[in-house]
Amino acid sequence: MEMLSLPFLRPLAPYWHVLIRLAVGAVMAVNGYGKLTGPGAEGFAGMMLEGWPAATFFGWVVIGVELLGGLLLILGALSRISAVLIAFVMFMAMLIAKGFGISAMSTDAGGATVDWLLLAGALAIAFAGPGVFSVDRYLGIEDAEG
């Protein structure tokens, strides 16, 4: 029965944080860079935040959190703070752009399946920490567990 638990993977358990951090960080950084070099804060705000007070300001906030937060996650620097901010941005993105109904889990272009994965990944890092290979651990911000 023990073979069903794939025991050969157990030595890799301390490194799951790094895998999640790299995946979420890379996707967020690429999305932030795309917003920055594509429509910019004004264009993004016009598309997604139309009618909101200070829409351009919040457009810059989203771009900053996605781009800088993603890069910080990749490095494992200020990981928990970056992860919480990314989780908040993803929550708001789903709330504003996609809604939280059953249709939000649709797999079509308007669905939020990837958004849910990014939210879950960011929360996993916020709760569990950046892992063994991180700037946070090197600087003593996180202990060996986080």
Image: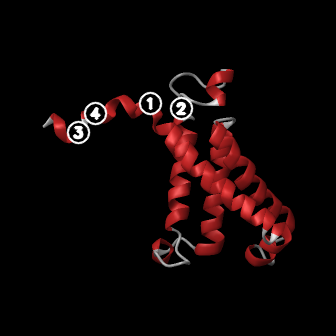
The x, y position of residue 92, in whole percent, is 65, 63
CA separation in Å, label 1 and label 4: 13 Å
| Badge 1 amino acid | Pro
Residue toward you, 49 or 42: 42
Q: Nearer the viewer, mark 3 or mark 4?
A: 4
Q: Residues within 10 Å of mark 4 (few under 14, many from 20)?
A: few
Tell me if residue 8 can be seen. yes
Q: For the residues marked 1 and 3, what is the alpha-carbon distance in whole angstroms?
A: 16 Å
Q: Which residue is mark 4?
A: 8
Q: Residue at x 57, y 35 (%)?
A: 130
Which of disc 4 and disc 1 is earlier in sequence?
A: 4
Q: Badge 2: how crowded within 10 Å, few (<14), some, or many (20+)?
A: many
Q: Residues within 10 Å of mark 1 (few under 14, many from 20)?
A: some
Q: Which residue is mark 2?
A: 131
User: Residue at 69% of width from left, 36% of height from top?
Assistant: 78
Q: Amino acid at mark 2?
A: Gly
Task: Return the residue at label 1.
Answer: 14
Say which residue label 3 marks: 5
Q: Of the residues shown, which amino acid type is indicated by label 4?
A: Phe
Asked if the residue under mark 4 is in contact with the one under mark 3, i.e. CB atoms within 8 Å, the reply is no
Kindly indicate whether the residue at mark 1 contacts the one at mark 2 (C-beta within 8 angstroms). Answer: yes
